[in-house]
Amino acid sequence: MKKMIKYIIADILRSRIMIAYTLVLLAISFSVFAIEDNPSKGILSLLNIILFIVPLVSIIFSTIYIYNSGEFIELLVSQPLPRKTIWLSMFAGLAISLSLSFLAGAGFAILIYAMSATGLIMIATGILLSFIFVAISFLASVRIRDKAKGIGAAIMLWLYFAMLFDILVLFFLFQFSEYPIEKGMVALTALNPIDLSRVLILLHIDVSAMMGYTGAIFRQFFGTGSGMLIALIIMLVWTVVPLGLSTIRFNNKDL
Amino acid sequence: MISIQNISKQFGKFKVLNNVSFDCGQGQCIALIGPNGSGKTTIIKSILGMVHPDTGSISFEGKDIASDWLYRNHIGYMPQIGRYPENMSIGQVLDMMKDIRKLPDSQIDHELFEAFNIRALLDKRMGTLSGGTRQKVSACLAFMFSSKALILDEPSAGLDPVSSEILREKILAEKKKNKLIIITSHILSELDELITEAVYMQDGSLRFHNSIQQLQKQTGEGKLARAIAAMIRQQDLQAAKGHTAILTAVK
Amino acid sequence: MSKLNKISAALMLLVWNGSVLHAWSKTIRVGRQFGVINIKEAIRMSAAGDTILVYKGVYREGNIVIDKPLVFKGIDKPVLDGVNKYEVLSVRSPHVVVDGFHIKSSGQSSMQDIAGIRVYNTHHVTVRNNLLDGNFFGIYLQQSKHCVIEDNRLLAYGKAEHLIGNGIHCWKSDSLTISGNRAQGHRDGIYLEFTTNTRVYRNVSHENLRYGLHFMFAHHNTYTFNTFSSNGAGVAVMYTHHVHMQNNTFKDNWGDSAYGILLKEISDSQIENNRFSGNTTGIFMEGASRIQIKKNEFRSNGWALKIQASCMENQVEANNFQGNTFDVATNSSLVLNTFDKNYWDKYEGYDLNKDGVGDVPYRPVSLYSMIVERFPAAMILFRSFMVSLLDRTEKMVPGITPEQLKDTLPAMKPVRL
């Protein structure tokens, strides 16, 4: 299994898209930090880019990779291996290589320019988001046989998490603005790993002061050590649940 | 060695396999033939555990394969289309497979590896290879682990005549080692002198399963292609007769 | 009245009115090396117009009352210690000068306003060059006129707003000059209530718990060249008219409800040539009218300007808005204020005729800032991708943001201030 993961990682890291991804992240993060003299501002500018690119590339790239590996997966299934091992190795290979690319592309710059708690949280969320969106792509691609439809679904899922969800949150806000919904908002962000990451990072940069009462509620909740732990657990749930569901599905799937 | 019993499989509305049963014994070389969409590939995939039949069971050396994956240690499989991760080198693919099989080096069969001169290509990435070279890699992988059973799905597709012949020799050699070999192929002529039994599939059902001798005796044809064609004609004729018999009876 | 009494009364008047009679005044020295070691004794010995020089040392004499016109001067910063119990110095006479003391540790009380130096119902008092360290209130003026508070340093170590008084506190006073002081760690750095015709300039007020400067019902005052930084809530100006605020710096007043300036019920005032940087909100206006906001620099604030619906006839002209998260926010769709000739770094228009004025108007209010005004919880979507998308769309096709809130003459380059 180790060797399999190692070779899958080696395969992915050498792919052109992955090299481009790393270089783009590298270029963006270094130029952002070069332009912004204040590292926490740099983090802020980088935040949007990371929350946009990392999930997008993670979900689309791994969906395509899974579909393109159809025959290879079949070959592996014909070998004396439990399916779970194959599926989890594929996951490990993709998630680790996407995280490595992220680390090389953005993490490096963050460590150099903004080595702080916020910077480290940003790196951690980047990695967790890579894992989460690979897991989500696994669920999508195991459920949908057709490649084109599968990639379409991956794009839709990304759109949902990156944008549509926030529109729903706004709608929710408009509807229930007369009620004390601040605590509900905390629960709501847990439903979207991108929002959760964004809020976590914003709370650690002092723009949290701008977030007013809601920000205060969030800080109360996520600002503490146990809050961070809860956030981490939520992110892990976001990885484990789609991955688990997809593994069950893959175990029973006809290839 | 492999026993298929009453397996049926439906993909959506489409019934791919309809109550198929047959046995594959050790030392046999079985041709699995039939038109496109007749269910050949589904049978192979069922044997390899890629497809789970809706009903029926498959056993390997007497053990049901449904809850087991270790039996695949004894099967070498050569897929119809061998596609591998693009940026993996041939060496890495071979290395990975060896790692999965965990067979001591002394027991690894390097014959095809040498015959196809794969060694010279070890560092080539899979994405840069031609279809034929990929087939050679697939063939290598299938024969590498001296498995008791070999399943070859359209093995000669895409291979050049020389390699095709090398592969054919290899199959013959393995046959002599008393292994079970299952081959699907469109080109019946290349199966001559290779196979001992033929399984003919049509529309998801088993049409017939005969030994070559039986086929030749029944049809009087020497060549496999002709024998099978004759066999099908005979069966159709009988069915038509039966049909008219029923019709007349009804009248 | 006897003849003698009349003469002495005339003499007293002369003393009060100037230094004409300096020739008659005497100097009393207080210190271990002199005959007098006790300040209270010195005051008792002194006559109006005398000078008391207090030499280096620590004087713990409880409450010291100056009840006649005296020049009360410390040499080498003598310490007047209130031992956390007393109001250290009470000035109850006009024409007193308090100069050069280190006044520390006044009593603390939640019932009384105990101060380091308190000036009671008088006039022409000067408090200068003192260090006030760890007092409840620093310098407290009540019903006093024509007083000068200058170049004092006020230090306090308040932990919570209700546990500490203000640095310079003026109540019902008039025509004061407050300049060159430095206040830190108090509740409000400088506080003016019912105080009029006062000039506050060149003060620094920082790291106070509540406001750097706070005035209520304090009309016709001028504030210039002050720096207000890192205060709990910035500067608050309430229920006041005719205020001039010029050349001040408001910076780093960053916090949940911190403002560069909080304007509440203010009218007929000028805010000019100030710098607002790094504040959560540069200027927050509520019930403000006829205010000219001109030639200010707003840089790197969360919100540069927050204008509530109750504001009208304000002019925002020729300011520079640079690097603010939100330039202008309002909770109203009715526009009663004018924006002209400002420089907005977010302006994306063009200037075809190169006259330095953008050819298309700039709308400084973003859709998202409107949403946040109405639904503060929406701040949770801050910096999300969707929000920037919404803002972009709204910029192209304004639907919700107030149509009339726009700068029709946006400057292409930052305004020279």
Image (cartoon, coloured by chain):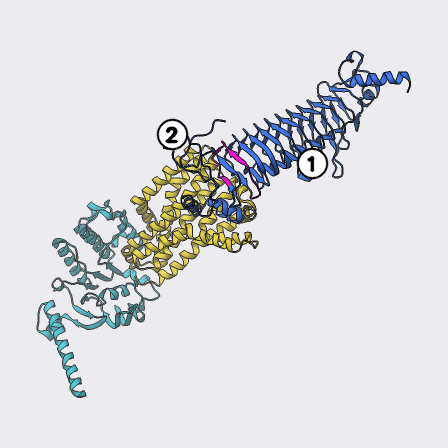
Chain colours: A yellow, B cyan, C blue
Quadrant where the image shows the C terminus of chain A:
bottom left
Asked if C122 appears above or below C312 in the picture, the reply is above
Asked if A32 appears above or below C199 in the picture, the reply is below
Question: In the depicted view, which residue is nearer to us: C308 or A205?
Answer: C308
Query: Is residue A82 at all visible to an observer of this figure?
Result: no
Residue C269: say if magenta: no
Instruction: Please give the name of the residue rendered at 81% of the width and 23% of the height, measured from the top-left corner.
Output: C40
Residue C354 is marked as 2
Would you call the spot at circle 1 few (<14 residues within 10 Å), some (14-19), or many (20 or more)? many
Instruction: Please give the name of the residue rendered at 20% of the width and 70% of the height, measured from the top-left corner.
Output: B202
Disc 1 vs disc 2: which is toward the camera?
Answer: 2
Left or right: where does residue C124 sit relative to residue C270? right
Real-space CA distance between mark 1 and mark 2, rounded to the nearest whole angstrom: 56 Å
Residue B26, percent from left and from top: 22, 67
Quarter residue C122 falls in: top right
Question: In the depicted view, which residue is nearer to us: C121 or A19?
Answer: C121
- Pointer 1 chain: C
**Helix, strand or loop for disc 1:** loop
Quarter residue C173 falls in: top right
Asked if B171 appears above or below C165 in the picture, the reply is below
Left or right: where does residue B237 sit relative to residue C16? left
Residue A75, percent from left and from top: 27, 57
Q: Are marks 1 and 2 in contact (CB under 8 Å)?
A: no
**Helix, strand or loop for disc 2:** loop
Type of the residue with mark 2: Lys
Residue B19, percent from left and from top: 26, 73
Asked if B101 appears above or below C193 in the picture, the reply is below
Residue C321: say if magenta: yes
Quarter residue C411 falls in: top left
The residue tagged 1 is C164
Query: Is residue A171 at all visible to an observer of this figure?
Result: yes
Q: Which portion, as a residue range, is magenta?
A: C309-328
